[in-house]
Structures are given as structure tokens and as C-alpha cells.
Amino acid sequence: MTRKMRMLSMVLVVVMVIGVLAACRDDAPAASGDGAIIVGALAPLTGPVAQFGTAVRDGVLLYTEEFNARGGVQIQLEWFDEEGQAALGVAGYHDLVDSGATAIIGAVTSGVTMAVVPLAYEDNMPMITGTSTHYNVTVDADTGRVFTNMFRSCFIDPFQGYVMANFAFHEVGAQTAAVLYNNEVDYSIGLTEAFLEQAEVLGLEIVAVENFQNATVDYRGQLTNIAQHDPDVLFVPAYYQDISVIGPQSQDVGLDTVLLGADGWATIADFMHDASSIEGAYFLTGFSPDVDDPQVQGFIERFYDRHSAQPNMFAAQAYDAAMILFAAIELAVDAGYEANTPEFKEAVIANMAATNMTGVTGHITFDDRNNPQKTAVILHIVDGRETFWGYF
């Protein structure tokens, strides 16, 4: 076979493969066999952040069952375990699209979500996350373009860093602060930048900034450096796995200060066998089971009946994310749009943008970057448990 013929054969094979893939995409069902609307869900159900993913799954499952029990529009969930890895999140997105998903819930961590969003934007796929907090989940980092299809029910990182700097200064009374963050995680970096920026505005003196990497097990070097400056507060915008080690090791090096965190701390008291090392810490979150509100308490009761566990922030925010998305889908169906058509997706996106509802994490509307406008909850570690300090 000549080189020209071989090249022609290769081109024909590629064309045939593309044709098959296109046919599969075009023939993907818009609804399940019983007429239910297919909604895809990306979450790390295994791997190092599975605790977040399973909480999200449980919140979405509960709302889906409640929504379907009302009758009318029915939702069928299709899950993909992305294990907290961006590459798997991308593969999962394609898998869910090929399965006929007309909207996506997820992903859970910001890194995975940001890997998927540009693909979903090109498809104009309605998408909402209950937990991805990085600023660039809804805004393109390079162009500043808003991903108009992407929404979230959680706070953004800049908001969290801004709030905790204000809390440190106005409520804790701190005059000096230190920061310990993960310089390989977008979430931690974004929170740190916002905290430092607002600290400068307030006149809150930053006496030390230390960082660590993924899989760190010994933080004593950084904590010793921080202890030498004796800060009034130490802001640690990291996940619960890190905090569970940083807490005891801060005691090991004699660091006596008030620890501050953000929503990555959620469930930390349950995760640690002995939470005494983080006693007195404060962290921002999107939900507290101690809020005296009938809607919140009803949700907690139903969640416990369904899952035999108390809901945490991730479950609550995922529950609200499903509520927002399903309401938008129902409105699109009622308007006569056919699932998985361009018109249907556009209608769902417009309906989400117009959201004005009260969920279990508060009253939710969206700004022009598709970020929710809500009040922050501050939790306080008292006697080894997460207690509701108040709104801030």
C-alpha cells in the first residue's frame, strides 16, 4: 500500500469514528424510558475527598426523592464517580452527556468543576454545584467572561476570605494574624488572597504567611515559624484532613492562638477523635443544624430518617442546588420545551438565573456572575463540637 493510500485509509477511519460518536451523541435519550428527565451528577464517591462527595450525594438523593414524590415532572439521576480528579471529571462529563443528561449537578471540588465548566459552557449545558467555591468556577480566569450556564449554591472563596478577615478583626479583636495555606489547591489559594487583601484594608497586621503542599503530614516547621510571631489568630483555609493534623501539631510546637477556617473545615469535629486541639476555633460555613427554623429542622429530620445521619453543610448545599435546578427544569417543561433541546437548556439556564427562593441554607438569589447572595454562618468549636455562633 502506498503512503498516499495509507493516509487516505487513516482519514476514512477517523471520519467513520467521528460519525459514530456524533450519532451516539445525537441519539442520546432526552429522557429515560419512563419519561423522566435525566440529570447527571459528578461527585467523588471514592478517593481522598469522598466524605464531601457522599454528603453531596445524600443531599441530592433526598431532594430528588421528595421532588419525584410530588408527581408531575420526574427526575432520573445518573452518577459518575470522579474521585476528586479533574481528568476523571472531564471523562465523567462526556459520559453523562452520552447518557442523555440534560443538566449537571457538580462537581464537588473547585478544581474538578473548573476543568468541566468550559466543556459545559460550549454545550450550553445547565450546571450547578453545591460546593465548588473558587471564583473562577463561574468566570473565565483568562477572559473574565461569565460562564452563563454555571451556577452554585455555596459561597465563593473571595467572600469567605473577606468575611473571615472581618470576623477576626471585628469579633475576635485580632490586631495580628498569620496564614497557613495549601499552595497546590485553588480553594486554599483563593481564600488566602482574599483574606490578605481585606486584612490590609482593615489594618490587620499579617505577621507570617506559610504554605504547604498536598500530602503533607508534618506541619511543625511552618507552625514553629508562626509561633515565633505570636499572632492573635491563625487563618488556615484548608480541608478537614489537613486541619485534623495541624490542630494537634500546633499544640506540639506551643502555638497558642485562635484558629480560623472556612467551609473546608465542615465536619472537622466528627472527623477528629480528639478535637481539643481546635477548641475555640471559628470557621465560616453555609449551614448549621442549630438554626431554629422550621424548614431547617424539617430537613434535618427527613435527612436523618433517610440516611441515619445528621446532614452537614455539603449535604445541605447540595440539597439546595438540586432544589434550584429542578425548579428551573420544571418551569421549562411547563413552558412546553422538550428535554435536551437547545431551547430547553436555554430556558433552564434563564430560570436558574431568576431564582428567588428560600432553601435550607438561606434565601437565595443570584448576582450577575451566578453566585448566590446569602448570609454566612459562623460555627464555633466548643467542648469538641461545632456549635452555631451566629450569622455574620
Image (spheres, rainbow, N blue to C red):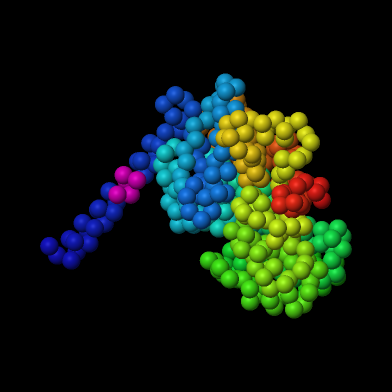
Q: Is residue 238 toward the left or the right of residue 7 in the image?
A: right
Q: Position of residue 112 (x, y in %)?
A: 53, 55
Q: Which residues are magenta?
A: 17-21
Given residues 233 and 200, the one toward you in this image is: 233
Q: Position of residue 172 (x, y in %)?
A: 84, 60
Placement of 321 over or under 280, stated as above or below: above
Q: Position of residue 262 (x, y in %)?
A: 70, 56
Q: Quadrant of residue 294?
A: top right
Tell me if residue 370 is in the magenta stretch: no
Magenta residues, dominant SS class: helix
Which residue sits at x=26%, y=57%?
Answer: 11
Tell me if residue 19 is in the magenta stretch: yes
Q: Is residue 136 toward the left or the right of residue 284 in the image?
A: left
Report how many numbered discs are placed on residues in the image: 0
Q: Specify the quadrant that holds the N terminus.
A: bottom left
Which residue sits at x=74%, y=62%?
Answer: 259
Which residue sits at x=56%, y=29%?
Answer: 65
Q: Is residue 340 toward the left or the right of residue 130 in the image?
A: left
Q: Quadrant of residue 184?
A: bottom right
Which residue sits at x=42%, y=45%?
Answer: 95
Q: Position of residue 111 (x, y in %)?
A: 55, 58
Q: Is residue 161 toward the left or the right of residue 341 in the image?
A: right
Q: Can you see residue 138?
A: no
